Amino acid sequence: MIEHDTIVAPATPPGVGGLAVVRLSGPQSGDILKALDSQHRPPKHRQATFLRLEDSTGLIFDDAMATFFRSPNSYTGEDMAEISCHGNPLIVQQLVSSCCTRGARIADPGEFTKRAFVLGKMDLIQAEAVASFIEAQSLESTRLHHRLLRGDLSTRLVALKTKLMSLLQSVEYALDISEEEIEPGFLPGLLKDTTSLDRSTSNLLATYQRGHLLTFGATVVLTGPPNSGKSTLLNRLSNSERAITSPDPGTTRDFIDVQFTLEGIPVTLIDTAGLRESRDSIEEAGITRTRTLMKDADILVWIQSATDKSPEELSLPKKPDIVLLNKSDLLDSSMKNTDPNVLFISALYGDGMEAFKSKLLKNLGGAPLLSSGVALTTARQHAALISFQRPIRQSLTILHSPNPSLELISFEFRDALESLDVLLGKTTPDDIIRAIFSNFCVGK
Ligand SMILES: Nc1nc2c(ncn2[C@@H]2O[C@H](COP(=O)(O)OP(=O)(O)OP(=O)(O)O)[C@@H](O)[C@H]2O)c(=O)[nH]1
Ligand SMILES: [Mg+2]
């Protein structure tokens, strides 16, 4: 999988800016930098150098600063250069093509990080964290991904691996010696240590829900009859005047989405067309969209006016997770809410918003992470850790049987070790690796 050519790509987003950064990685990086410089000076490791950029015909096209990194002390582990030029897309294009005429080729998405992974600068969990880190939608999520990038989750997994390897060694040693030589405390000790390994794994697996939410966020869809206050609620929660509200039923036709964060969880909140039998074809198209959005919602919120005693019976694609009775300000103050699954709110005046937000959080099910905590974030990590736990549990079953077979336990332990290696990327199939890196942006 190791490539020996030199790759180039802009590392900053396309468009106009004060500066843009172009990255090079591969054995020719130093030579290309030297050729770009009008004075053709050889670059020095970790030193920023002023460059007067020259194209292959000798024309000067910009002044830039370049930093060179000598292998293996670079992000990818190869010789690398980062060139900061002026943030004009034409200059960036000129710089990239000048690198290409001197032997580089345009990098594939995620190829810099893929090289870092292949050359052992990071494991697969850290590589996955790179993509999530730059796309994280909340500060809590950036902090989590920075910890993953730093290797905190990998350290926890390596600790599991070390523990399992020492258990495997003790089992193999016991298999090598005669039965009489095995110490009487050996099996109870093995049972105790395997149980503790299983518990540590469960604790780590339990972090997935929150980690996944922090990384990918949640979609909350507001639905209900027309005029119930959905758009007013969207405006209040997002602290904006994003949606038009009016006493006329059928105001919202297309859906409107806003982003906000709830205890670090990025939430996409969607306001939809009110549900009713409509004779207006545009409104009807909006209602069809509402029904599709309802199906894909992580949390479906039904909102109706508290003064509306018996709203029209409507068939919903799924049961709402939260029911809100809005316009509580119009109710007689003596009215009490007796149903814990129904919340009274006033979207217009803000009453009941805290209760609604905590109900949302509870329904999302993510217990807050400790500020130093790590979490599994991707479905791949979760599935691989489940595959690790399965044989551990299988060996516990064997250990609880009357005459536990050490051969079988050793087999299960080896199986578990393989899953950990897949998780960390030591023995991950190529197609999975390709799929992970193809989701990256170019230049990362
Ligand atoms: N008194 C009171 N009025 C409210 C409250 N929430 C919304 N309203 C009013 O109810 C009317 C309808 O509100 P919208 O937010 O437009 O309702 P909607 O559910 O988005 O309606 P459609 O887009 O037609 O489906 C507006 O006049 C709002 O000011 C509330 O809590 N109390
Ligand atoms: Mg509306």
Image (cartoon, rainbow, N blue to C red):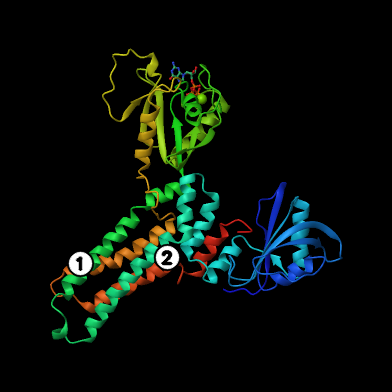
- Which is closer to the viewer, label 2 or label 1? 1
- Taking the image as drawn, is residue 320 in sight? no
As drawn, 155 above or below 441: below
Q: Nearer the viewer, residue 146 or 49?
A: 49
Q: Secondary structure at mark 2?
A: helix
- The 10 Å Cα crowd at callout 1, few under 14, some 14 to 19, many 20 or more, is few
As drawn, 332 above or below 260: above
Q: In this rendering, would 296 be left or right of 410?
A: right
Please identify the quarter of the rendering in which residue 393 is found.
bottom left
Look at 47% across and 48% down and name the residue there. 141
Q: Secondary structure at mark 1?
A: helix
Residue type (three-letter) at the residue carrying disc 2: Leu
Q: Earlier in the sequence, mark 2 or mark 1?
A: 1
Q: Nearer the viewer, residue 9 or 230?
A: 9
Please identify the quarter of the rendering in which residue 305 is found.
top left
Q: In this rendering, would 102 be left or right of 161?
A: right
Residue wearing tag 2: 423
- The 10 Å Cα crowd at callout 2, few under 14, some 14 to 19, many 20 or more, is many
- Give the x, y percent position of residue 210: 39, 48
Residue type (three-letter) at the residue carrying disc 1: Lys
- Taking the image as drawn, is residue 156 in sight? yes
As drawn, 148 above or below 194: above
- Say which quadrant the N terminus sits in: bottom right
Q: In this rendering, would 99 be left or right of 310?
A: right
The reply to whether dot 2 and dot 1 touch (C-beta < 8 Å) is no
Look at 13% across and 72% down and name the residue there. 402
Look at 20% across and 86% down and name the residue there. 177
Q: Nearer the viewer, residue 62 or 397?
A: 62
- Give the x, y percent position of residue 275: 46, 27
- Say which quadrant the C terminus sits in: bottom right
Residue wearing tag 1: 192
